[in-house]
Image: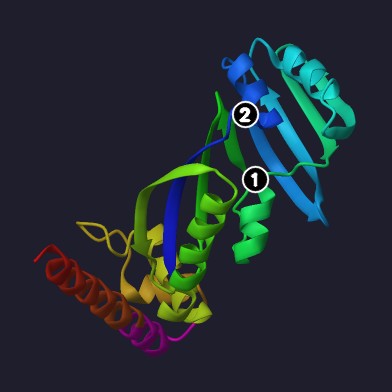
Amino acid sequence: MPNAKLRLTVPEEAWLGEITRRFPETRIRVLAAIPDGLSGVGLVEMTGPTAEGVVTAMAEQDDVTDIETLQRRDDEALVQFETSDPLLLLPARGSNVPLEMPFDIRDGEVTWTVTAPTEQLSELGGQLDEFGIDFSVEYIRQEPDRERLLTDRQQEVVEAAVDAGYYDTPRQCSLTELADRIDIAKSTCSNTLHRAEEAIIKEYVQREIVGDISAV
């Protein structure tokens, strides 16, 4: 499934864009955000020398209908707020693309990492355009389905082998020692590793072939 990294520019007329540009020294990290109809609720962590100024500025915004400081210490603040203008949540909701948390907002710029089918990523781009949010795409790459690459048992044995130094040069652990370590028969250990190695190598070769074709 495609994984994309986007860099957004919050419109200057939006309250979030105006405040973060007024206090560029402070980073706002969105830890959680929930749309609720046309409003939204957010939990944000602020870090920087003007964190207190950001909290005060937010409280003065007409579009911020409720705000509560949960924690404040030196140049940090943890704030929960509700807004009638959740600009950044609307494009994601309209395209059904889940936002990966946390994400940062600083000096009017936002970085998103999203994973979704190609059609939904395209719809997200359309929604951002519709809401007047300029954006650029830093990358789009195809992520392998790691859950299907190895079974739970294969992953457990491979991780145990790596931890034990089975793949080190020189090898720090024999197959017999590895089998004893994870309490399985030597033949079972060997067969499980072979199937896992087969899956990993085939996946690697396939990705290299796809990369070579894309570069042509």
Residue depicted at x 82% and y 42%: 84
Residue 23 visible in the picture: no
Q: Amino acid at mark 2?
A: Gly
Q: Which residue is painted at 59% across and 41% down in the image?
A: 103
Calculate the distance from the C-alpha at mark 1 to the C-alpha at mark 2: 11 Å
How many labels sit on residues? 2
Q: Is residue 48 left or right of residue 63?
A: left
Colour scheme shown: rainbow
Q: Position of residue 152 (x, y in %)?
A: 52, 78
Let me know if residue 193 is in the magenta part.
yes
Q: State the SS at label 1.
A: loop
The amino acid sitting under disc 1 is Leu
Quick check: 84 above or below 13? below
Residue depicted at x 16% and y 74%: 209
Quadrant in the picture for residue 16: top right
Report whether residue 103 is seen. Answer: yes
Q: Which residues are magenta?
A: 184-195
Crowd around label 1: few <14 · some 14–19 · many ≥20 (10 Å): some
Q: Residues within 10 Å of mark 2 (few under 14, many from 20)?
A: some
Dividing the image into 4 quarters, which one contains the C terminus?
Answer: bottom left
Whether 188 is among the magenta residues is yes
Q: Nearer the viewer, residue 1 or 172?
A: 1
Which quarter of the image is occupied by the N terminus?
A: bottom left
| Residue 203 image offset from top left, x and y in percent | 28, 76
Q: Main secondary structure of the magenta part?
A: helix
- The image position of residue 53, as x and y in percent, is 74, 12
Q: Position of residue 58 (x, y in %)?
A: 79, 24
Circle 2 SS class: helix
* Circle number at residue 17: 2
Location of mark 1 (residue): 88
